Image: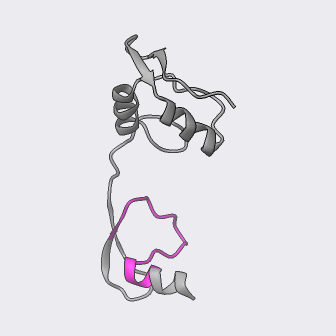
């Protein structure tokens, strides 16, 4: 078995060279990742901070909507627009229903 050596890679985002260390390569191999990183650690961190979610698009600030819990009647905030005719629960009632 050959010993893994550090590699120099070029970041596709900023163009800077960065090291893909032997330990990182081993980690990638353990996790089953087939591709080498295409961004340097700084650009990866920036991208992770700015883009998330299933669509990979920019994170949007969530607007909270004030609703009345369908179970206990308490006023609460939810991070989505409720659909008419569907119940909406406060955190406590939701957790109780989820646990059943």
Residue 80 place in picture, x, y as percent: 42, 59
> In this image, 24 relative to 31: left or right?
left
Residue 3 place in picture, x, y as percent: 60, 28
Observer-nearest residue: 21 or 54?
Answer: 21
- Tell me what residue is drawn at x 65 percent, y 27 percent: 2
> In this image, 66 relative to 22: left or right?
left
- Tell me what residue is drawn at x 66 percent, y 32 percent: 34
What segment is highlighted magenta in the picture?
Answer: 77-94
46 over 61 or under it: above or below: above
Residue 41 place in picture, x, y as percent: 38, 29
Observer-nearest residue: 57 or 41?
Answer: 41
Observer-nearest residue: 29 or 82?
Answer: 29
Dominant secondary structure (helix, strand or loop) of the stretch shown in magenta: loop
Res 86 quadrant in image: bottom right
Quadrant into which the N terminus falls: top right
Quadrant into which the C terminus falls: bottom right
Colour mapping: one colour
Q: Is residue 37 visible?
A: yes
Residue 62 place in picture, x, y as percent: 35, 51
- Tell me what residue is drawn at x 52 percent, y 27 percent: 37
Confirm whether the magenta stretch covers residue 90: yes
Confirm whether the magenta stretch covers residue 6: no
62 over 66 or under it: above or below: above
Observer-nearest residue: 19 or 61?
Answer: 19
């Amino acid at each position: 078995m050959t010993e893994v050596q550090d590699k120099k890679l070029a970041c596709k985002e900023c163009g800077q060279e960065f090291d893909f260390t032997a330990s990182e390569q081993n980690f990638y191999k353990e996790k089953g990742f087939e591709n080498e990183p295409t961004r340097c650690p700084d650009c990866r961190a920036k991208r992770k901070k700015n883009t998330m979610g299933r669509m990979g698009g920019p994170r949007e600030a969530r607007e909270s909507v004030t609703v009345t819990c369908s179970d206990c009647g308490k006023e609460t905030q939810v991070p989505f627009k409720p659909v008419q005719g569907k119940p909406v629960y406060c955190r406590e009632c939701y957790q109780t229903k989820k646990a059943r």
